Image (tube, rainbow, N blue to C red):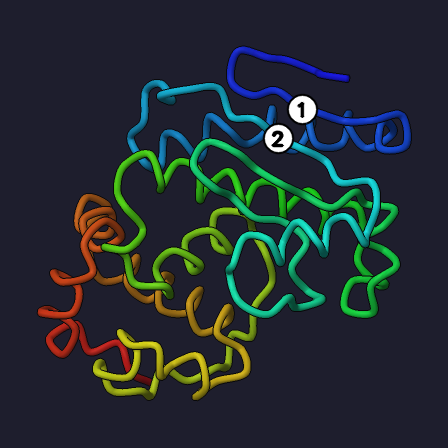
Amino acid sequence: MIYETDIYSIEYDQKSEPIVKTINDALSQNFQRVMDFWGIKKLGSTVQIRIFSDLEEWKSFFKSLSQGTYQEYVTGCAIGSNIYVLDYAEYKKLQSHRNDSIEDFKKIIVHEFVHICHLQLCNLENTAFFMSEGLATYLAGQGYNQNIKIDYPREVLFSNEIFSRTNDLYSLSQKIVRKLEEKVPHEKLIEYALDSKKLYDDWDSLALSN
């Protein structure tokens, strides 16, 4: 079954039908704000959302994407103009999400929509991982460890080494984005989000470490 709007469509089955309204609410309340942040007037194509109503099917799908080892906390992803998300009923079965509320689930939908907008403007290969995830978690209003320290040299932050150096990369990412927003104009923040080389070159002068 398909639920459609001018901006997005939601593919679901009978089992996942109860969560369609929740996903629609999350997007209808936030998509314009997110698009305005990026300066996007119109998306290039309709965002297609697919709900996985079976946890094992979700795991198999995610593994097929060759995005590395499956991690339990991963319950959504964005590829091109597509969002794939695990149904809330299955999501709540996971140890890492069993205490999450429906509001937490909504934020995952917004998080993935932020990635969709980002992907429309650039190839994410040109974006530092911490900018991509920092902006997604920030714009979705997801919680983070405010006390985390930005104390890695830029050579580590802008390389795959950072993945093994911290166990809370999402908090670190959001902290960096919030610090950048305090220090630079919005247009510069967008520029850094689209081109990691510019951010790398300016990193030391930005003095974000704390």
Q: Is residue 68 left or right of residue 187?
A: right
**Disc 1 and disc 2 in contact, CB within 8 angstroms:** yes
* Front residue of 38 and 72: 72
**What residue do we see at 90% from left, 32% from top?**
15
**What residue do we see at 17% from left, 50% from top?**
188
**What residue do we see at 69% from left, 27% from top?**
25
Q: Identify the element where label 2 is drawn.
A: strand
Query: Which residue is label 1 attached to?
Result: 10
* Front residue of 6 and 69: 69
Can you give x and y, in whole percent of width and height, for residue 115 in the image? 44, 44
Can you give x and y, in whole percent of width and height, for residue 199 in the image? 17, 64
Tag shown at residue 49:
2
Q: Is residue 111 above or below residue 167?
A: above
Q: Amino acid at mark 2?
A: Ile
Q: Residues within 10 Å of mark 1 (few under 14, many from 20)?
A: many
Question: Tag 2 or tag 1, which sits nearer the N-term?
Answer: 1
Can you give x and y, in whole percent of width and height, for residue 185 in the image? 19, 50
Can you give x and y, in whole percent of width and height, for residue 58 in the image? 73, 50
